[in-house]
Image (cartoon, rainbow, N blue to C red):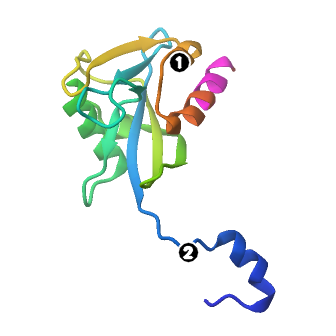
Amino acid sequence: MPWGRADAGKQALYHRPDPVRVLTVVAGLLVDGDGHVLITQRPQGKAMAGLWEFPGGKLEVGESPEAALARELYEELGLTVRPDDLKPFTFASHRYEEFHLLMPLFVCRTWDGTPIPREVADIRFVPPDRLTDFAMPEADAPLVEHIQTAFRE
């Protein structure tokens, strides 16, 4: 629908002349029996190498977010997770220079296996209040804030 003259102010607010590529990735908030959460370190040779993040990755064509996350957790950490055990928790929306990242975060408290770093440099279970001790990508900041608030309650 074309913008009318009465909507000219709204057009300035909502219209973006330069198209932006939206990249959707899924992430998991794996919580152990002690209430600690799993973070993984990005390996050398990848963008943002050395930073810590929540495990996950890109969706493949035709894949649901839950199925993609279950696949990524197996590939990265050797964990078997049922998509039904992944519950929506929060999301991040962050503009990087080359793309805009949309990242739903799912909480998971049940999995089979012991996490091992298959496609990541390192893994750690940390108390939520210690997440800010680890250098993370900019997009993860609102996730960390939400996690810390939720786990304080």
Q: Which residue is mark 2?
A: 17
Quick check: 9 above or below 127? below
Which stretch did the figure color magenta? 146-152
Which dot marks residue 2? none
Residue type at mark 1 is Leu
| Horizontal relation, residue 100 to residue 58: left or right | right
Circle 2 — which element? loop
Q: Residue at x 75, y 83 (%)?
A: 8
Q: Residue at x 47, y 50 (%)?
A: 102
User: From where the camera sits, is residue 79 visible?
Assistant: no
Q: Nearer the viewer, residue 81 or 41?
A: 41
Q: Which residue is mark 1?
A: 131
Q: Residue at x 53, y 18 (%)?
A: 131
Percent x, y of residue 62: 26, 60
Q: Residues within 10 Å of mark 2 (few under 14, many from 20)?
A: few
* Lower sequence index among marks 2 and 1: 2
Q: Residue at x 64, y 26 (%)?
A: 150
Q: How many marks?
A: 2
- Per the model, the C-alpha gap separating discs 2 and 1 is 37 Å
Q: Is residue 147 magenta?
A: yes
Percent x, y of residue 133: 53, 14
* Residue found at the far top of this picture: 34
User: From where the camera sits, is residue 152 visible?
Assistant: yes
Q: Nearer the viewer, residue 68 or 133?
A: 133
Circle 1 — which element? helix
Q: Nearer the viewer, residue 19 or 30?
A: 19
Which mark lies nearer to you, 2 or 1? 2
Q: Is residue 94 magenta?
A: no
Q: Nearer the viewer, residue 2 or 95?
A: 95
